[in-house]
Image (cartoon, grey):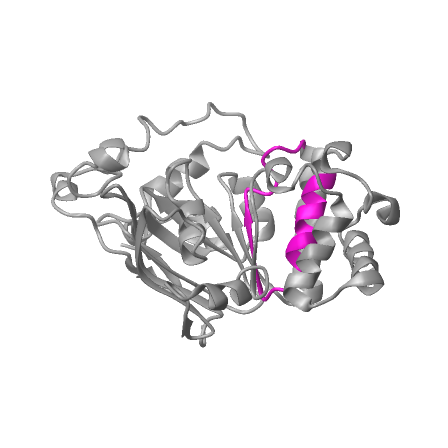
Amino acid sequence: MTQPLAEIRGLTVAFDGVLALRGVDLAIGRGETLGLVGESGCGKSVTWLAALGLLPAKARVSGSVRLDGREILGADAATLDTVRGGRVAMIFQDPASSLNPVHRIGTQLVEALRLHRGMNGSAARAEAKRLLDQVGMPDAGRRLDAYPHELSGGQNQRVMIAMALAGQPELLVADEPTTALDVTIQAQILDLLATIRRDTGMALVLISHDLGVIGEVCDRVCVMYTGRIVEEAAAADLFARPAHPYAAGLLEALPPIEGERRPLAAIPGSVPEPWAMPPGCPYAPRCPRHVAACDTAPPPLLDVAPRRRAACIRPLVAAEAA
């Protein structure tokens, strides 16, 4: 990758002295789609909330976050106001709680256009309608005067995507955008995100615990566990042959689409709490490839094959290559 659009290096986050992120390193190029996966509590959402300065004041954040080579971590409010919603937009998990229930949809869209593009009056309303049309909202003109509670979950999610697009961002971070939706609407939202990315050329970060969603949309995948990235690979490579045992465990827990039926293989145990991390590799207590050396120190994220990295002293790819 040449100079990435966004680059995160050594990002750590602590709450009340307890580490939630433990040195996250990732980058995303222009027009790329990056998937961020892992069980709940692994730090997927916190990574981007920290990068955009959206965590509460008690959070202690360190490291580096660069946008087009410019450091934005710890930047002043005026700088962040131009970045958030303008160059980088974020769609949150629950659209119903992200939209203001006492304001009409059109009012909220026009506010985003005023803040990020300086539009007002009839021009802003016309652009708001165009955005709703772009995201496939039926009867877009009438929906401008509706309140969030008058729309379905899928329609509210389309409104959130329209608001994110209002600032014409270079990077869109979608945090579990389909979690609360049924499978039919989920597929529509994923198709919509893919179409918008293709039409606008923006980069997309898709945060999810659903590997099926990630495999359908993303070019590259970062697998997170206990606040660190434990594997990074092209999506096709990850699904064909995972390198880290945790990534392999996630894939084995998926039901097969084709072939013979088999029992699902659940990963034993659960993600350790941030204040009770095991010594050495945090995945060691759950790992079928655990050896004594795994308990000495957390393994670094290193190259294990061309264009892929894993944080494991016994990666599956290296074992198979040998």
Q: Nearer the viewer, residue 179 or 90?
A: 90
Q: Residue furthest top?
A: 263
Q: Is residue 16 left or right of residue 73?
A: left
Front residue of 209/77: it is 77
Q: Nearer the viewer, residue 241 or 70?
A: 70
How many discs appear? 0
Q: Quadrant of the N terminus?
A: bottom left
Q: Residue at x 45, y 38 (%)?
A: 251
- Residue at 69% from the left image edge and 56% from the top image edge: 111
Image location (x, y in percent) of residue 223: 40, 48
Which residue is more in the foreground, 174 or 74?
74
User: Residue drawn 64% across and 62% down?
Assistant: 115
164 falls in the magenta region: yes
Q: Magenta segment: does it hold 307?
A: no
In the rendered image of this protein, does residue 262 appear above or below residue 77? above
Question: Image check: 123 left or right of 26?
Answer: right
Residue drawn 25% across the image and 41% down it: 16
The magenta-colored residue range is 155-182
Q: Position of residue 144 (x, y in %)?
A: 81, 47
Q: Is residue 168 visible?
A: no
Q: Position of residue 153 (x, y in %)?
A: 69, 34
Q: Position of residue 177 (x, y in %)?
A: 60, 43
Name the quadrant containing residue 152: top right
Above-or-below relation of 26 to 60: below
Residue 237 to residue 104: above or below: below
Say which quarter of the image contains residue 146. Answer: top right
Observer able to see residue 140: yes
> Split into 4 quadrants, where in the image is the C terminus?
bottom left
